[in-house]
Image (cartoon, rainbow, N blue to C red):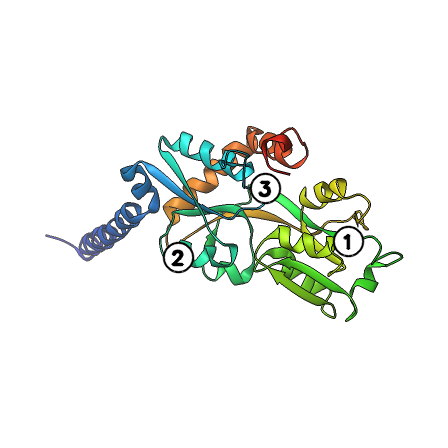
Amino acid sequence: MFNRRTLGLAFAALAATTLAAPAQQVTQSLTQESVIETIKQEGVIRIGLSIFTPWSMRDVNGELIGFELDVGRQLAEDMGVDVEFVPTAWDGIIPALVSGNFDVIISGMSITPARNLTVNFTEPYAYTGVTILANTAMTEGFSLEDYNSPDVTFAARRGATPATVIATLFPEAELLLFDEDGAATQEVLNGNAHATMSSEPTPSTEQRQYPDTLSIPFDQNFLATGESFALRKGDPDALNFFNNWIGVKTRSGWLKERNDYWFKGTEWADQVNQ
């Protein structure tokens, strides 16, 4: 005959079993619905990116090269799948991810609270800041405070982090927005804007190319945040895999080696149209 203690233990065991079954089913469901399973089944990972040097760019033959391409190809190789890159305009890249146009964004995207409301971010796989690139003649003698004036015009790529940094640091200045980094730099070259901001090595590269017109007035990086993969919400399995992959490649030194090649060297410069 069961005593009260025995009966209580039996009910507790039954309750634990009853609760464990739905929990296991939820875990299995999340795993099956993960984009990682889709990638494995289809044998290809689709990566969304936006074109900007040296993260991703076209070489003289029209092929995609750059830091992001190295990262994406190595990721696919380690997963044992093919890779498909999907070039996408920056201001539409998050909606395209959410809509399922590709599996993950690997495009030098820094974490912001506004973006994080829509997508999940991995741990950073790279760290960069943004630098001021100025028209030398138009900004001669300027202090940093002088750039925050209604008489000063900045140019930047629409929807990108530098545009946000400019608006935050220099709210009094006029801000012209363009779809490409190159267009913003061209405005500075043409004397239609005093300055632009972008991630290295773009400012240093442009300054070396046009030393009589452009300068980097301050030895300072602004908003040096980490760049992360972005993926759709509700996928803990994918977040775990990507984080672990980034961790492995960080500890092995592979990410630093590839980053140094594209951001600190110029060996690749002859591969692209100048």
- State how far apart marks 3 and 1 are (Cα): 25 Å
Q: Are there few (<14), some (14-19), or many (20+) residues within 10 Å of tag 3? A: some
Q: Residue 41: horizontal and vertical position, in percent?
A: 27, 38
Which image quarter is the C terminus in?
top right
Tag shown at residue 126: 3
Q: Are there few (<14), some (14-19), or many (20+) residues within 10 Å of tag 1? A: many
Q: Nearer the viewer, residue 170 or 235?
A: 170
Q: Secondary structure at mark 3?
A: strand
Would you place residue 116 above or below residue 42 in this image?
below
- Name the image quarter holding residue 161: bottom right
Tag shown at residue 71: none
Tag 2 residue? 98
Q: Disc 1 residue type?
A: Ala
Q: Nearer the viewer, residue 264 or 88?
A: 88
The reply to whether the C-beta atoms of the residues labelled 2 and 3 are less than 8 Å apart is: no
Q: Is residue 79 left or right of residue 210?
A: left
Tag 1 residue? 134
The reply to whether the C-beta atoms of the residues labelled 2 and 1 are less than 8 Å apart is: no
Closer to the N terminus: mark 3 or mark 1? 3
Q: Residue at x 71, y 56 (%)?
A: 196
Residue at the right extreme? 141
Mark 2 or 1, closer to the camera = 1
Mark 2 or 3, closer to the camera = 2
Q: Disc 3 residue type?
A: Ala
